[in-house]
Amino acid sequence: MRTKKGFSLVELLVVIAIIGVLAGYTILRLVDNRYDVELTSAGNIIQSTVIKTRDMARAPQQEGDISDDLVVNGYGIQFPLVGATDIVLPIFRDTIDKTTPENENKFSSGDVNVSTAILRESDIANVKVLKYIYYDINNVMSEDTDTADARDIVFNSKETPTSESVYYNQNNIFTKVGISLQHIITKKEVIVWINTNGDVTTEGL
């Protein structure tokens, strides 16, 4: 009678090595997917905050002459510094200021925060603001990487009775502006685009 032959030591080592490789690959894929989720979630929160602000500006506003004090000029978002990881997005009501017109279409001391979206590092880790991108009237792209100042984006609802405008740092957005987010570990990016007509899209993952 023939005896049943078992696995040799070499065969066992080969099987263990294959299992180890497969397990390592699976773990790496799970970690990479988690990082992608972090980046996508951050982009989605910013996109939804921008849409909320746009819709607030499009809603019926207080009646009154366009030059009256405290009449709503629009609604805006304060965006963080380039490089920020604790991303706080205050939504503010931009009021018409006939005394100091340059205070319109940006956040100023007379404006009031109405709500805040917060992307804290403890909630969505490893995501930072990489840069801001905008296109001028000739569709020429420029990148804004200045780390000294925050940015404002304002949806103007009172500029004329029948139209709205979108402003980036008090300058009319002639084509579109983008908020670029980067994952600190994977270096992958997503960009939330805001068009002059108020359309909001996300490009990336």
Image (cartoon, helix red, strand yellow):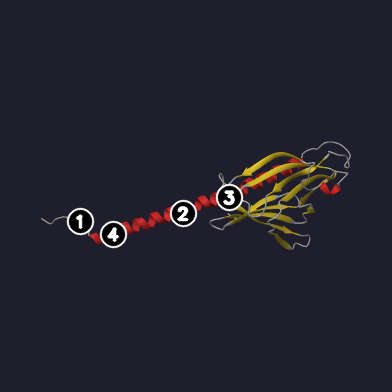
Q: Give the residue pinned by disc 3.
A: 40
Instruction: Point out the image quarter for the N terminus.
Output: bottom left
Return the disc, 4 or 2, that comes first in the chain's sequence: 4
Q: Where residue 186 appears, x then y in whole percent?
A: 54, 57
Instruction: Point out the image quarter for the C terminus.
Output: bottom right
Q: Where residue 66 appears, x then y in whole percent?
A: 87, 42
Q: Are marks 4 and 3 in contact (CB under 8 Å)?
A: no
Q: Give the residue pinned by disc 1.
A: 6
Q: Give the residue pinned by disc 4.
A: 13
Query: Residue, x 69% and y 55% (percent of image)?
Result: 178
Q: Residues within 10 Å of mark 4 (few under 14, many from 20)?
A: few
Task: Give the amino acid at mark 2.
Answer: Arg
Return the disc, 3 or 1, that comes first in the chain's sequence: 1
Residue 18 placement, left or right of 186: left
- Marks 1 and 2 sit apart, C-alpha to C-alpha, by 34 Å
Quarter occupied by residue 139: bottom right
Q: Give the residue pinned by disc 2.
A: 29
